[in-house]
Amino acid sequence: MSEPSTFSVRGEGARITVDVYRYTYSGASDVSDANWVSSRIDCDIYGCRLRIDATLTTADFRDFLRDLEAAIEGGTATFETIEDWLRLKFVVQGTGRAIVEGEVGNPGWPTLRLRFEFESDQTYFRETIRELRAVCASFPVIEKV
């Protein structure tokens, strides 16, 4: 497997990393199928660790990047995957701090979900924006097949 394109969400005692490896359906004849990517979600929240292989969409990353860039000085940014693998909500305060709420789990196992909340700040989420830009450059939304 080649090196993934990666972004992380970090904060006090917490780190969520999403590795994106490849387009899942490289020969897709349908735009919606063409935008699925094979990924891995690693969570380390206050010592509780969870790793899940997931299929996400390129639009998930694009939309989160747009929201996070808009919320950097204050506001809310949300990362939600279509199939409910991962949900993150950043509530960015004007002081440069943020509260990150979220949930991760395998949608095929709805009773196995990790819910969490932690503090973050501009140092961390500016790095997340930089990493998300790289993910979006490596795996752009395919508009036409």
Image (spheres, rainbow, N blue to C red):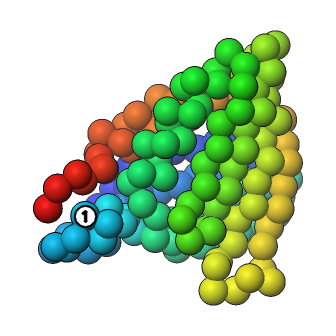
**How far across and how far down the image is residue 17, in percent?**
58, 52
Residue occupying image coordinates x 49% and y 33%: 66
Say whether residue 7 is left or right of residue 117.
left
Residue for point 23% across, 51% down: 143
Q: Point out residue 115 in the picture as x, y percentages from the top left corner.
A: 83, 62
Choose between 13 and 39: the one closer to the eye.
39
Q: Residue at x 71, y 33 (%)?
A: 76
Q: Is residue 74 left or right of residue 39?
A: right
Kindly state the secondary structure of the residue where label 1 is placed.
helix
From where the camera sits, is residue 98 visible?
Answer: yes
Q: Who's the residue at 84% across and 43% down the image?
A: 118
Is 127 placed above or below 3 here? above
Residue 23, image x and y in percent? 29, 65
Total labels: the figure holds 1
Q: Position of residue 38 (x, y in %)?
A: 39, 68
Question: Based on the displayed image, in which of its 4 quarters is residue 72 positioned?
Answer: top right
Left or right relative to 82: residue 133: left
Which residue type carries mark 1? Val
Which residue does the numbered mark 1 point to in the structure image? Answer: 31
Decide: is 101 above or below 124: below
Please rate how many residues cluster around mark 1, counting C-alpha atoms within 10 Å: few if below 14, some from 14 to 19, many from 20. Answer: few
